């Protein structure tokens, strides 16, 4: 059993005022370590509240422009962490925002941008949360960090922890793709492959974290994680000279990514760095679409079946429903679902037309945009950013499904010519 080390550093976070419960809306003054609402229990996920006057004394649009720290740490003034030197951490964030050269025109959009977050150190968007999680675990004096995940949060947690010398204990469902599993094992995590689905995995991880007192990196529970994810929006805003697109499309599983993306734009709006929050398009697979179903029926979320090849968003019982619903509602966005065939097609077209290789959940946002344009939800005079949340190398099996077969040929030029496949 791991013993929690006593907390040595006295925390002083002048820019954080406290926490508000997303369910009962009670406000709690800042405490070093608060996971969920004491009144509501585990479902009472918290929002972290900031004092924007304090933040605005530390950063401005100009100070950001002059900052050469090309990672999420350029935004440390916005994060619920003590101010310290993060140069020994993995380089998370500051991923490219590509202007689409073909797909945007094909869809008749004013402009389409693709933010390739597969280029993070462990090849997914999850590094934004894990970087902050690991920093928090160090700040609080833990020696072990733990999470349950369908794969990317886990491999990301393992990699970021390895870099700073934290131990990691990772719970994954049996179906986690090999690429992600290989990453965790190489990063030296203790990996527990749970015989069951994601729900079983989450429950075992929760019980073990309670039992052993590790730092909890479960994004649905720990309010710090979603704050790391908001750095993607800061980057999008900066990369577009503080004039973000009309829409930002995000694929949705637990709902933390979309919640974080919204929080980022909200922060910038409150600080006056941008004058409009983009509409957020939440995209799921029709094989697992609890948010889309709830929005369509105008009813509370119900558990959904988990039947999509996009494993990273195959989440039947989302752990962060309130923040996700709020992201779409408050930004006047939309929920949309796309079948798996359209996800595979999106993988092909992003690869062929733009040179961007995303895993199924990574390209789902683009598949959703295509759908939304067809349905007239996104109009042709509008601009869109799609976040590609993970690299295609994460899930080679499905990439091969999308990509098709190579041409077989003996080492014989005549045979190659006879095949008529090259010219
Ligand atoms: C985790 C993940 C998502 C969805 O994030 P949630 O916070 O679960 O909604 C989307 N794409 C990829 C590649 C992911 O790993
Ligand atoms: Zn509460």
Image: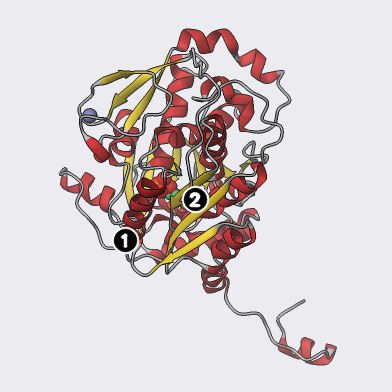
Q: Nearer the viewer, residue 22 or 64?
A: 22
Q: Which residue is mark 2?
A: 153
Point out the tag, 2 or 1, that comes first from the N-terminus: 2
Label 2 CB less than 8 angstroms from ligand 1: yes
Q: Nearer the viewer, residue 301 or 346?
A: 301
Q: Nearer the viewer, residue 77 or 290?
A: 77
- What residue does disc 1 label? 200
The reply to whether residue 115 is visible in this rendering is yes
Left or right: where 196 falls relative to 380: left
Residue 252 in view in this figure: no
Percent x, y for residue 369?
43, 48
- Side (left or right) of 192 relative to 96: left
Dot 1: what SS?
A: helix
Q: Residues within 10 Å of mark 1 (few under 14, many from 20)?
A: some
| Secondary structure of the residue carrying numbered label 2 | helix
* Residue at figure coordinates x 50%, y 44% from the top left: 386
Residue 55 in percent (x, y) is at 52, 13
For residue 348, the mark is none
- Note whether 405 is above or below 156 in the view shown: below
Report how far apart the C-alphas of labels 2 and 1 lie in the structure.
Answer: 16 Å
In the rendered image, the quadrant that contains the C terminus is bottom right
Q: Residue at x 36, y 62 (%)?
A: 339
Neighbour class for label 2 at 10 Å: few (<14), some, many (≥20)? many
Tally the marks. Answer: 2
Q: Quadrant of ligand 2?
A: top left
Q: Position of residue 57 (x, y in %)?
A: 56, 7
């Amino acid at each position: 059993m791991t013993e929690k080390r006593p907390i040595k550093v006295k925390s002083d976070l002048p820019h954080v005022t406290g926490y508000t419960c997303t369910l009962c809306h009670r406000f709690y003054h800042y405490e070093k370590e608060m996971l969920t609402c004491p009144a509501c229990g585990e479902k009472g996920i918290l929002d972290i509240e900031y004092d924007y006057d304090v933040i605005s004394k530390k950063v401005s649009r100009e100070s950001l422009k002059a900052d050469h720290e090309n990672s999420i740490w350029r935004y440390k003034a916005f994060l619920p962490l003590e101010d310290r030197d993060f140069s020994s951490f993995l380089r998370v964030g500051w991923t490219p925002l590509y202007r689409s050269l073909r797909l945007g025109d094909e869809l008749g959009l004013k402009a389409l941008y693709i933010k390739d977050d597969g280029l993070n150190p462990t090849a997914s968007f999850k590094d934004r949360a894990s970087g902050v999680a690991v920093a928090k675990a160090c700040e609080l004096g833990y020696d072990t960090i733990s999470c349950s995940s369908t794969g990317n949060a886990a491999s990301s947690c393992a990699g970021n922890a390895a870099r700073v010398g934290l131990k990691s204990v990772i719970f994954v469902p049996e179906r986690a793709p090999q690429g992600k599993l290989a990453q965790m094992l190489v990063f030296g995590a203790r990996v527990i492959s749970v015989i069951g689905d994601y729900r079983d995995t989450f429950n075992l991880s929760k019980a073990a974290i309670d039992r052993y007192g590790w730092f909890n990196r479960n994004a649905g529970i720990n309010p710090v994680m979603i704050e790391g994810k908001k750095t993607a929006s800061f980057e999008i805003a900066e990369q577009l000279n503080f004039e973000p697109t009309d829409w930002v499309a995000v694929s949705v599983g637990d709902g933390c990514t979309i919640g974080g993306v919204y929080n980022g734009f909200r922060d910038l709006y409150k600080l006056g760095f941008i004058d409009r929050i983009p509409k957020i398009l939440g995209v799921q697979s029709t094989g697992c679409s609890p948010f889309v179903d709830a929005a369509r029926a105008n009813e509370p979320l119900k558990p959904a079946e988990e039947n999509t090849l996009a494993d990273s968003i195959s989440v039947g019982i989302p752990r962060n429903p309130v923040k996700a619903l709020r992201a779409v509602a408050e930004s006047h966005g939309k929920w949309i679902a796309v079948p798996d065939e359209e996800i595979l097609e999106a993988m092909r077209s992003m690869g062929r037309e733009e040179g961007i290789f995303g895993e199924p959940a990574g390209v789902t946002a683009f598949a959703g945009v295509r759908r939304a344009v067809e349905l007239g939800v996104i109009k042709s005079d509008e601009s869109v950013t799609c976040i590609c949340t993970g690299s295609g190398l994460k899930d080679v099996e499905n990439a091969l499904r999308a990509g098709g077969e190579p041409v077989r040929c003996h080492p014989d030029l005549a045979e190659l010519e006879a095949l008529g496949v090259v010219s």
